[in-house]
Amino acid sequence: MDVTSGIGVPQETLDAEIKSFFESAPPLKNRDHICEKLKEFIDRNLLPSGNGNARRVVCVTSGGTTVPLERRCVRHIDNFSSGHRGAASTEHFIKAGYAVIFLHRRRTYQPYCRSLPEDPLLECFEVTDESNIQVRQSDSEALTRAITEHHAAVAENLLLKLPFNTIFEYLQMLQMIAISMTSLGAQAMFYLAAAVSDFYVPWTSMAEHKIQSASGPLDIRLVQVPKMLSVLRKVWAPMAYCISFKLETDTKILLEKADMALKKYKMHMVVANELSTRKEEVVVVTSNEKISVCRDKTQVGTDVENPLIRLIVERHSAYIENPDL
Ligand code: PAZ
């Protein structure tokens, strides 16, 4: 019998690739600290909230993973993702009553800071005559709102921010988060908006030192990153509501690819988006629908994540009521 993983690769091969990825990945430096923070965050949110139930917790992944070319990394392969989707979605999830584990690429967009200037420390403040520092009048409202909302989310245990850089860090942390969220059952959600590298250089075949240009043209063999979505669904977090994203630049293949991902990885929902219009429109693909979700262009300062998260919260509620549907 040909037992496949549902992604065209025999299950045994996939298991071996995943095992080898984790065994050969450089161990996370602060693993114990992350573990402790996760446990504390989940335990607090397991306590009954206002409605007598554990709070819903969503892991939002955000930004692009890097692929190091050297172990003592001087160069890496990167991608376009700014983390805007993840940061905006985190704010909307918190507003909807969720606690968010924000697994994000270091130095990408952060929740509550999207409307601030690029370098808020230098641009939002000015030095007064008395050599004191004060907030510029024009930035005062945005800064006050950002600080207040961020502090409230952290103080109420609704936001845990965990940064990553590399594909190795990202996948190890995703696994830790998924396993630590098991106790939440159907109250848990994964919203996988990060742009995850498809190819990488295995740690075992990676150069130790900076690659020298004197050696001539660079010839690197990139290996496919094992497809972790199916493991997330089947093994790490079988009860969680799982949403993945599909990005394409060719709109002709976008919906077909999203549909394939939905079926192959048994996602509950795939959000399809095209690179240049991703801030204006997305299409939510489920087993029996394709729903176009657009930013409300009649209002200033709105984003597409607002209606998108509203729809997702509705669907998650229905799933919690009946996970077998
Ligand atoms: O991070 P950002 O706001 O610039 O872009 C968001 C996005 C396009 C990375 C996200 O919506 C997405 O599609 N992520 C998955 C990409 C993929 O691997 O297909």
Image (cartoon, rainbow, N blue to C red):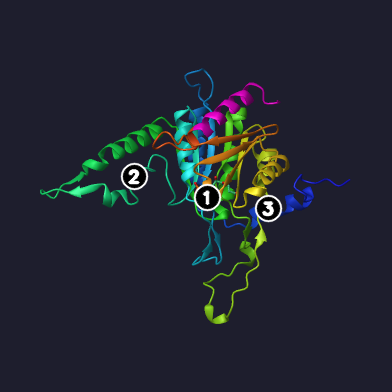
Give the residue type that dot 3 points to: Pro
Q: Quadrant of the N terminus?
A: top right
The residue at the point 51 percent across, 66 percent down is: 75
Location of residue 240 by image quarter: top right
Picture coordinates of residue 60, whole percent (x, y): 53, 40
Give the residue type that dot 1 points to: Ser
Closer mark to the observer between disc 1 and disc 2: 1
Q: Which residue carries the number 1 mark?
A: 276
Name the secondary structure under disc 3: loop
Which span of residues is magenta-colored? 307-325
Number of the label disc, if any, that sits on residue 116: 2
Give the residue type that dot 2 points to: Leu
Picture coordinates of residue 286, whole percent (x, y): 66, 34
Q: Nearer the viewer, residue 45 or 296?
A: 296
Residue 261 shown left or right of residue 88 in the figure: right
Name the secondary structure under disc 1: helix
The residue at the point 58 percent across, 49 percent down is: 172
**Is the magenta region chiefly helix, strand or loop?**
helix
* Mark 2 residue CB less than 8 A from any atom of ligand 1: no
